[in-house]
Image (cartoon, rainbow, N blue to C red):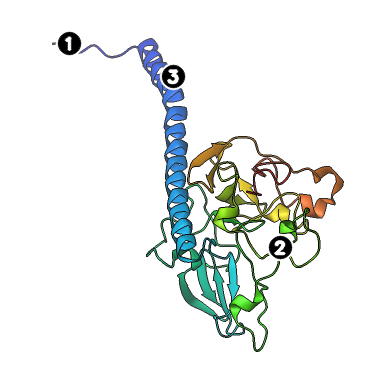
């Protein structure tokens, strides 16, 4: 029996068909990967939101602080208790779950954004990272430097962003309680943090703390989209990275930190960050 070989034309046709199919399938496979990472990121954010709600329930409606310096009794111990991880200055092997996880064990996989590859910019270590927490309005923050004779909670700093325009004067509060979050459905509490140098863990408003805000934006790393967890518990995808109201008027050494449009804000003002 004589075996008939493929002709050159037939081989070229087969190769062309295979190339065409690959051209169709590869983008689909890539989009499936992007979609899968986006869904996993949304699941992680829901878990963070649940942990924050439980914490607030146990602490008179207050969400966990973004940062405490030192121990409750002594702010000079070198402990850095951030919302995500608890580390210790001078001891790179020390890493514990942070303040958010007081009632939740093993947050490692939850704290790793599936679309982010890189180190934790705060500790410099290989800790799971990629998400940030609204410290512009919701989470309390402490001074990063301990003071002799003071405990960690004594160092919580008043937020200028929380000054009540209807009641001027006095010292502004350090954070809001859950009952004060009247726009819970439109206010971000957690997101996927990013700026020019990687990830960040502290979410800023584009019109508050101008020396810091462009390092506290959101990363649009899911095919030009970012995931956001809102105070009321739902998680959504945001597609429009914004530069902030004052972008064009600020020096480039600040605005270059944003690396827009890879990163951006959820609103040009406080609208997406202030829940009052």
Q: Which sits in the foreground, 254 or 42? A: 42
Left or right: where 185 falls relative to 101: right
Residue at point 46%, 55% (across, down): 48
Residue at point 55%, 42% (across, down): 185
Q: Residues within 10 Å of mark 2 (few under 14, many from 20)?
A: many
Instruction: Report the residue marked by disc 1.
Output: 2
Q: Residues within 10 Å of mark 1 (few under 14, many from 20)?
A: few
Instruction: Report the residue marked by disc 3.
Output: 20
Percent x, y for residue 71? Answer: 54, 81
Residue that sits furthest to the bottom in the current view: 149
Q: Residue 159 carries which label?
A: 2
Residue at point 66%, 39% (across, down): 241
Decide which of tag 2 and tag 1 comes sooner along the chain.
1
Decide which of tag 3 and tag 1 comes sooner along the chain.
1
Q: How far apart are marks 3 and 1 (CA)?
A: 32 Å
The picture quadrant where one finds residue 81 is: bottom right
Residue at point 73%, 64% (across, down): 172
Q: Which sits in the foreground, 38 or 43? A: 43
* Residue 191 visible, this orientation: no
Left or right: where 97 falls relative to 206: left
Q: Nearer the viewer, mark 2 or mark 1?
A: 2
* Residue 209 visible, this orientation: yes
Q: Nearer the viewer, mark 2 or mark 3?
A: 2
Percent x, y for residue 121? Answer: 60, 62
- For the residue labelled by badge 2, is the local secondary structure a helix, a strand or a loop? loop
Left or right: where 32 falls relative to 271: left
Q: Distance between the residues labelled 2 and 1?
A: 87 Å
Residue that sits furthest to the front in the current view: 167
Disc 2 to disc 1: CB gap under 8 Å: no
Q: How crowded is mark 3: few (under 14 residues within 10 Å), some or many (20 or more)?
A: few
- For the residue labelled by badge 1, is the local secondary structure a helix, a strand or a loop? loop
Q: Is residue 139 above or below residue 116?
A: below
């Amino acid at each position: 029996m004589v075996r008939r070989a493929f002709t050159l034309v037939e081989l070229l046709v087969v190769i062309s068909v295979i190339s065409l199919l690959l051209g169709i399938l590869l983008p689909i496979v890539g989009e499936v990967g992007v979609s899968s990472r986006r869904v996993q990121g949304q699941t992680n954010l829901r878990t963070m939101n649940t942990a924050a709600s439980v914490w607030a329930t146990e602490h008179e409606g207050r969400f966990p602080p973004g940062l405490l310096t030192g121990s409750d009794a002594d702010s000079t111990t070198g402990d850095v208790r951030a919302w995500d991880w608890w580390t210790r200055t001078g001891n790179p092997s020390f890493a514990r779950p942070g303040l958010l996880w007081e009632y939740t064990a093993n947050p490692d996989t939850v704290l790793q954004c599936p679309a982010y590859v890189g180190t934790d910019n705060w500790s410099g270590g290989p800790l799971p990272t990629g998400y940030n927490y609204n410290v512009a309005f919701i989470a309390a923050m402490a001074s990063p430097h301990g003071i002799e004779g003071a405990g960690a909670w004594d160092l919580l700093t008043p937020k200028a962003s929380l000054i009540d325009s209807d009641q001027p004067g006095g010292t502004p509060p350090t954070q809001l309680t859950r009952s004060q979050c009247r726009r819970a459905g439109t206010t971000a509490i957690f997101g996927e943090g990013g700026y020019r140098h990687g990830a960040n863990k502290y979410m800023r408003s584009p019109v508050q703390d101008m020396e810091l805000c462009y390092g506290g934006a959101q990363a649009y790393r899911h095919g030009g989209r970012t995931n956001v967890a809102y105070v009321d518990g739902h998680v959504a995808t945001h597609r429009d990275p914004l530069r902030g109201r004052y972008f064009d008027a600020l020096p480039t050494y600040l605005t270059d930190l944003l690396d827009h449009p890879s990163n951006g804000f959820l609103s040009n003002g406080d609208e997406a960050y202030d829940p009052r």
